Amino acid sequence: MHTEASRVHLLHEQQGPGSRDHKLRKLDTQPTTQRCRRDQEICGQEQPATHLYKVLSGIVRLCIIRVDGRRQIVDLLMPGDVFGFTSSSEYDSSAEAVESDTVVAVYSRRSIEALAETDDHLARTLHQISCETISRLHAQLLIVGRITAREKVGSFLLEMVDRLSAGTNVILPISRYDIADYLGISVETVSRSLTELKHRGLIELSGTRRVKIVDRHALEDGFGGPRFSNAA
Amino acid sequence: MHTEASRVHLLHEQQGPGSRDHKLRKLDTQPTTQRCRRDQEICGQEQPATHLYKVLSGIVRLCIIRVDGRRQIVDLLMPGDVFGFTSSSEYDSSAEAVESDTVVAVYSRRSIEALAETDDHLARTLHQISCETISRLHAQLLIVGRITAREKVGSFLLEMVDRLSAGTNVILPISRYDIADYLGISVETVSRSLTELKHRGLIELSGTRRVKIVDRHALEDGFGGPRFSNAA
DNA sequence: CGAGCTGTTGAACTTTGTCAAGGCCCGTGG
DNA sequence: CCACGGGCCTTGACAAAGTTCAACAGCTCG
């Protein structure tokens, strides 16, 4: 493990575009940061849940490996996002840095809970962060629950634009393989869907990572053939 | 709206099999219950998030209706479960009673947050409940993220057994249509998957709702075998 | 008793996973 | 500097699986 951990004052932390630096300020009393290289594991599935983490820079993915060897990405964390919540004593997923120089703040779960006992504001903040996680997971369920691969990829792109940029351009933070494991489809289908969206004029691609949203409404609506609901 | 709301002491509440009556005890200071009939809306998507709810009996589903009219079920609540968490000022999904005589406890969000300011234990409880929600959503993502419909239906059945019963028998709390919208597949595929699992001897069906798990391990493993198998 | 809802099954069609091959990019080592 | 190797990405062909449309059976309830 080439973990590089050091004690610094998080008040000086640099924030990404989706900055939420007002959150977890109180946790700065025991700040530790960890700088990770690509694919480095930050915490492991079924290991004791001793810490909470906040992404300071870079991207983190939460993964679960199935018995059949398939990998599922159950959350994608960007700067400002917090992870490590679990209702049991162990993490229910592992966390990995997606790119090199990903930096996370590390907080002792025990300390936080102790602090929250006396610090109302911290307790509120914790709750607010939990709610954000719940909303994010609802959004992911909506994306993964769509029917066709084009719809999944399309709404995934919109989610990335909304979370990572202010306009219509976005640089995808993860590989096609990661997208596949996030959406629950195969890499080839991800690739095909992207080129199809491009050919239909809904997006533009520069290189493999840079995407421009051309027709947001068509991406939202699902386009490409009507499909009807089961709703009673 | 045939809402029947009344002030009672929740300390006397009846609990279902997955009882967590130790949770939210402190909220009993302002207890209100609401009894709902089938398909009744408890709170609506994009309406002001003024309350939190706890299921006392029956089943509640959280739904999101897409622009194309399709419905997605983003959570399924059983007795003891709490819903209504959102990071914004509005609910991001609507909540509906699945069956008649579903009873929920209603808590003012404002009051709870005020109480949590001074009550450490309540704050902890809230956080714990949030974490349970997160774990439940991770589990749902794992189910929906599986590849084949048989795998989705199989792991859905296991989830229901684990949450609703102590043994291998379970009475499905929702219809085929609800299962379809929970798993993101069509009703017909749900039906076909169930009959196939039955023919393969992995489950037994009595009527349409009563299910017995015969081969849990095969259901867990995904059972990725081909449709036409000799190993009957 | 009929209307309506739920569930199942069949058949045609569409989409996706899988296997296979090849292109592109970049870092490394000769 | 260039060749090489190994990820990453794309594309094609085919088989498997899912959606859709359609029909029908069972059931409840007015």
Image (tube, coloured by chain):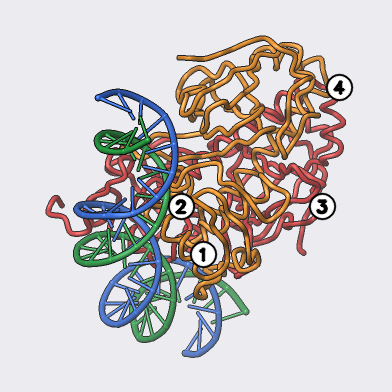
Chain colours: A orange, B red, C blue, D green
Q: Residues within 10 Å of mark 2 (few under 14, many from 20)?
A: some
Q: Which mark is residue B172?
A: 2
Q: Earlier in the sequence, mark 4 or mark 2?
A: 4
Mark in front: 4 vs 2: 4
Q: Which mark is residue A198?
A: 1
Q: Element at badge 1? A: helix
Amino acid at circle 4: Thr
Mark in front: 3 vs 1: 1
Q: Residue at horizontal 80%, vertical 43%?
A: B32
Q: Is residue B160 visible?
A: no
Vertical arrangement, residue B91 with respect to residue D14, above or below: above
CA gap, disc 1 and disc 2: 43 Å
**Residue that label 4 marks:** B118
**Residue that label 3 marks:** B48
Q: Quick check: do tags 1 and 4 share a chain?
A: no
Q: Which quarter of the figure has residue A77?
A: top right
Q: Residues within 10 Å of mark 3 (few under 14, many from 20)?
A: few
Q: Work out which quarter of the rendered image holds the C terminus of chain A and state it.
A: bottom right
Q: Quick check: do tags 4 and 2 share a chain?
A: yes
* Residue B199 locus on image (x, y percent): 23, 57
Q: Residues within 10 Å of mark 4 (few under 14, many from 20)?
A: some
Q: Earlier in the sequence, mark 3 or mark 2?
A: 3
* Residue B157 locus on image (x, y percent): 40, 47
